[in-house]
Image (tube, grey):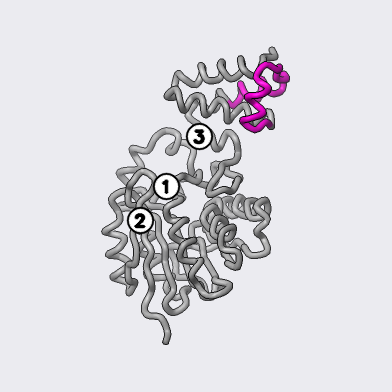
Amino acid sequence: MVKQYGALYLDARRALLETEEPDMAGFMARSLICHVSGKNPDLFLADRDLYATEEVCRAVDAGLRRLKQGEPLAYVLGEWDFYGLNLTVSPDVLIPRDDTCAVTSLAIQQALFLNQDPRVLDLCCGSGCIGLAIASRVKDARVTLADLSPEALTVAKRNMMQTKLSARVRCVQVNALEPAPAFLGKFDLIVSNPPYITAEEMEALPISVRNYEPHMALYGGEDGLDFYRSIAKNFSRALKPGGFLCFEFGMGQGDAVCRILEDNDYAVLERVRDYNDRERAVLAQYGRKED
């Protein structure tokens, strides 16, 4: 049954109110309809009295069923915006979140002051969102996206191509829990949003995260710090003298992450907060710069 776009929106929002707050229900309904119809929000509003096709109505109904089961909107859409980039996402990668803008901005800020043609490693890259955001803002940066998951790298490669950054970005398979492989070479900056959820926290994750997002990208060991220990210890060999390491971390982990960095000959330079005023990222420098 065909419906006017305005009625389609109201029906979709009403259905989502069973599980969502009013503002979120409206946002999700509008995003879903715009996605399946190919309309931007302004055109959707202008066309509210026009009739959507049966194909659009069926696609909206299918999307609503997935959303009401708890599947995240980003996976239903198959795409998500991050730092001005429209990125492909799938259940093989974490959904880029606003929290991660903190570490991304910190890394971009540092990369802008590095020598010409800086080499940047995005370790545990997932969708590639951090590394691609750096490449988009630091026009001479050469970025390597690294992850252990072949499926995540497939998504990262697709994003590399659709953002038209493949001339300065490459993807490689790397295990962040093992010593840095020699083929990586040396970097001016390593940035990482590694898995940091503790064993206890894994049991209490929301359904939308626990049932849909990849556990491999979430679980950071019993205390959530396994990847920080490994990267600080094993990836300093992949940094140039005086190189920088930038981490995202979970709520309340800042002091522990900084201790790990300092125990591995890093000097903590800056700690920053995210949009929710929670401490979220740290910048550190390894060893001393050469004279």
Is residue 12 visible from the viewing direction of this image?
yes
The residue carrying mark 2 is 272
Say which residue appears at 50% left-offset and 43% top-offset. Answer: 95
- Decide: few, some or many residues near mark 2? Use Cα within 10 Å; few <14, some 14-19, many ≥20: some
Q: Which quarter of the picture shows residue 249?
A: bottom left
Q: Compare marks 2 and 3 and give the one earlier in the sequence.
A: 3
| Residue found 44% across the figure and 75% down from its top | 237
> Of the residues shown, which amino acid type is indicated by label 3?
Pro
Instruction: Check disc 3 and report its element: helix, strand or loop.
Output: loop
Magenta-span inclusion, residue 57 = yes
Mark 1 or mark 2, whichever is nearer to me? 2
**Numbered range of the magenta stretch:** 39-63
Q: Amino acid at mark 2?
A: Val
Image coords of residue 170 (percent x, y): 62, 63
In this orientation, does residue 221 appear? no
Q: Closer to us: mark 3 or mark 1?
A: 1
Residue, disc 3: 72
Instruction: Place residue 245 in its image quadrant.
Output: bottom left
Task: Specify the quadrant that holds the N terminus.
Answer: top right
